[in-house]
Each structure stands twice: as structure tokens, then as C-alpha cells.
């Protein structure tokens, strides 16, 4: 009986020997594939060169980077072309979405240096905080004269406010109103007064009372670790003289942001769900895992991709600045009341489980499913895409 040579890798033992002719043919085909790959890279480089021409034109005429209709039309055309060529249209779409994403990132990086009102003095109140420093970089790179007013700078407030065309409040929520009242009388009449707080009604009202010039509320739906503003949402809540604030809105558009203009009241109501309840629920789950001393790496060995994704979002929360989330969760009495409702809802469900009332669970599940309606199918498609990407990566 023959024994296997322990020095040979298992793959070599199981592989059948190939003839010289087959090896030569494989090598010929591989060389052809290499040549095609080189052409693909060269074409991508040529495409990027054309993108550079587009950027110069957009910068000259203050045209936003993101053009949704153009992108979706292009994707549809490439899908049709892929189908006609015998390719999976989903495969073609995925490739082109990545190409377009890279194109937007490149454009945004170059457009960051385009100031709609380059040279204008911009004052960041609370500019030494994480978001203040973040916007300092963006405005400075775009050619604005950026000034900082932080805790120790109030004796110099009149000089710092002289001739400023934009003043942005970037301080913790609990002191936002008091800082607005304090800085308002020092601002020039034509200065755009803005804030970037995650609640909008109270700061907007305070700014309108403290300043007679243009007023606008902003809520950037991203944090200071964001590397690009490409497709990042900036919520705009109009205060006074929206036309006088338009150049600021245009600046964010030029940087690649998506502008969502809403009423301050609607913003606060929606964000209570989108941010407050969601972040609190994530915090509570992380707290429970710590309390139980769960072995996280071990759970991942047994987990489905969806669990890895969900746990990743929990871990993501605790990798960031806790002060940012405390501001969101503790922002208002209304948000506290909403969290109480959420906890009461969980308590009611626990009672159902303790009674073993499966019929009530199924009935409630059906009601919720009907309420979600078509969004459930959309959620299934989107989450499946994310899961597939996670499987590819890990």
C-alpha cells in the first residue's frame, strides 16, 4: 500500500496532472485576461481624466457634485447593455455604483477647495470641539477665513465677530441657548447665524430672538470621523431670510452633501425616533451584554451574518465619543417622555412572553407586518445586500 508523501501539500495530492498542451492553453488564456485587465484599468484612468474636466466645469459654475437622476439613468443604461452582452445586470450595476461612488469622492475632494464665498470670515463658536474642528478644516480648505471663539475667547468677542459673514454655533445642547443669547448682539446685521445642534426648534427660536439678520438651522447627520461629505445628509430648517442663507446651502451642496429642507418641528419629531430611541436601544443592549459578561468573539463563531451586522452596529456606538450620544439622548423632556413610552412597550411585551401567550405575539406580529407594508420588502432587499457584502469581507 502506497503512503502519501507528507512533504506534498494536500492540493498537490488530489490534483490530477495536466498535459503540457493544457498548461500552454491555460497560460495563453491567462495572458489574454491580463491584457484585458490592463485595458480595464487604462479605461478607468481615462474616465477619471474626463471626471476631472467635469469637476473644473462644476467648480466654475457652482454646480453640485451629486446628480441623482443622471446616475440612475446611467445605471439603467449599463444594466441594459450588460443584459444584451450576456452579463448579469446586477453584477454590472454593482461595478458601476462603485465607479460612480469613486467619481463622486474624487469630485468632492476637489470641490472641497471651492469656496462659494471664498475669503469670507467665518466664526465657529465652540470651534475647539470635535464638530467645530471638523468644519474648521472644510471651511479653511475652501478658502474661508476661519476664526475660533471658545470658552476662553469671550474677552475678545468683538474683534472675532468683526465683519464675519457666517457664525456657526457648535456647542453642547445644554448650553446652546445661553451661548446664542450671548453671541447674538455682537454679530453684524448681515451675518448668517447658524447652529449644528441635533434639535432644531429651541435653538432656531433663540437665534431669531438674538439676531435680526439671516438665520438658519443645520443638522449634519454625520459625525466628525466622516472622511467625505459625498451623499451625507445635511438637514436645513429655515429661520429668516433663506435667500441670504442660500450661499451656505450651496456650499454644502458643492461639497457633495444632500440637502433636506424641513420644518424645525417635524425635524425634532422624526429625529426623536431616528436618533434618540435607536441610540438608547443600542446603548441598553450593549449595557446588557457587558452586565452578562458575554464572550463577544465566541458569539461571532456561532452567529449568522445578520447577527454580526447588528453586533457591529452596537460596537460602533461604543467606539465613539459618549458625549455626542448623551447630548442626543438627554436633549429634551420630550425625548425623555418618548423613551418612557418605549420602555413601557417593552415591559408589556415581557408580560406577554412570561404568560407564554404565543397567540398574542403572532397577532401583534401580523399587525406590525401589515403596518410596515411594502417597506418590509425594501428592507429585505437592502439588508440582504449588506449581508452579502459582509460575507464577502469576512
Image (tube, rainbow, N blue to C red):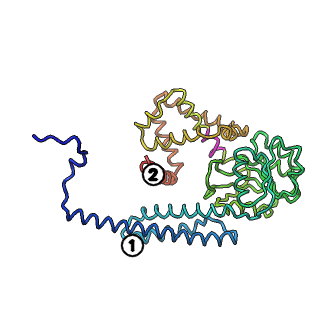
The quarter of the picture where the N terminus appears is top left
The correct choice, above or below, for 273 with respect to 109 in the image is above
Residue nearest the viewer, comparing 393 with 308:
393
Q: Is residue 277 magenta?
A: yes
Residue nearest the viewer, comparing 261 with 210:
210
Looking at the image, which residue sits at the far left?
1
Looking at the image, which residue sits at the far front?
7
Left or right relative to 241: residue 265: left
Q: Residue at x 71, y 52 (%)?
A: 135
Look at the numbered disc 2 and give the secondary structure of its residue: helix
- Residue 9 at x, y percent in the picture: 25, 45
Q: Residue at x 89, y 43 (%)?
A: 155
Q: Is residue 22 magenta?
A: no
Q: Which residue is mark 1?
A: 84
Magenta residues span 272-279
Q: Residue at x 73, y 44 (%)?
A: 129
Q: Are marks 2 and 1 in contact (CB under 8 Å)?
A: no
Dot label at residue 54: none
Left or right relative to 381: residue 250: right
Left or right relative to 385: residue 193: right
Q: Which residue is mark 2?
A: 389
- Residue 25 at x, y percent in the picture: 25, 66
Amino acid at each position: 500500500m502506497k503512503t502519501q508523501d507528507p512533504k506534498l501539500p494536500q492540493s498537490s495530492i488530489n490534483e490530477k496532472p495536466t498535459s503540457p498542451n493544457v498548461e500552454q492553453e491555460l497560460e495563453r488564456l491567462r495572458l489574454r485576461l491580463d491584457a484585458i485587465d490592463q485595458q480595464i484599468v487604462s479605461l478607468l484612468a481615462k474616465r477619471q481624466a474626463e471626471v476631472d474636466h467635469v469637476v473644473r466645469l462644476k467648480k466654475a459654475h457652482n454646480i453640485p457634485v451629486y446628480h441623482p437622476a443622471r446616475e440612475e439613468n446611467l445605471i439603467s443604461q449599463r444594466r441594459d447593455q450588460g443584459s444584451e452582452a450576456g452579463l448579469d445586470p446586477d453584477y454590472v450595476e454593482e461595478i458601476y455604483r462603485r465607479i460612480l461612488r469613486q467619481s463622486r469622492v474624487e469630485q468632492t475632494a476637489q470641490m472641497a477647495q471651492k469656496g462659494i464665498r471664498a475669503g469670507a470670515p467665518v466664526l465657529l463658536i465652540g470651534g475647539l470641539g470635535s464638530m467645530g474642528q471638523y468644519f474648521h478644516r472644510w471651511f479653511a480648505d475652501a478658502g474661508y477665513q476661519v476664526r475660533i471663539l471658545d470658552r476662553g475667547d469671550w474677552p475678545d468677542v468683538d474683534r472675532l465677530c468683526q465683519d464675519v459673514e457666517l457664525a456657526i454655533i457648535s456647542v453642547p445642547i445644554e448650553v446652546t441657548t445661553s451661548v446664542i443669547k450671548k453671541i447674538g448682539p455682537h454679530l453684524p446685521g448681515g451675518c448668517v447665524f447658524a447652529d449644528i445642534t441635533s434639535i432644531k426648534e429651541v435653538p432656531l427660536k433663540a437665534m431669531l430672538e438674538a439676531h435680526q439678520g439671516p438665520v438658519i438651522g443645520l443638522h449634519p447627520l454625520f459625525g466628525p470621523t466622516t472622511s467625505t461629505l459625498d451623499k451625507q445628509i445635511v438637514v436645513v430648517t429655515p429661520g429668516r431670510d433663506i435667500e441670504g442663507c442660500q450661499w451656505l446651502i450651496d456650499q454644502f451642496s458643492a461639497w457633495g452633501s444632500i440637502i433636506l429642507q424641513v420644518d424645525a418641528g417635524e425635524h425634532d419629531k422624526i429625529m426623536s425616533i431616528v436618533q434618540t430611541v435607536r441610540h438608547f436601544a443600542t446603548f441598553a443592549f450593549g449595557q446588557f451584554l457587558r452586565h452578562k459578561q458575554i464572550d463577544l468573539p465566541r458569539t461571532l463563531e456561532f452567529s449568522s451574518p445578520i447577527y454580526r451586522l447588528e453586533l457591529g452596529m452596537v460596537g460602533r456606538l461604543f467606539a465613539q465619543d459618549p458625549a455626542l450620544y448623551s447630548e442626543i439622548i438627554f436633549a429634551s423632556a420630550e425625548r425623555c417622555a418618548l423613551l418612557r413610552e418605549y420602555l413601557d412597550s417593552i415591559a408589556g411585551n415581557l408580560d406577554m412572553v412570561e404568560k407564554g401567550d404565543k397567540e398574542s405575539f403572532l397577532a401583534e406580529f401580523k399587525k406590525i407586518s401589515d403596518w410596515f407594508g411594502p417597506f418590509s420588502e425594501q428592507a429585505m432587499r437592502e439588508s440582504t445586500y449588506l449581508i452579502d457584502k459582509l460575507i464577502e469581507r469576512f
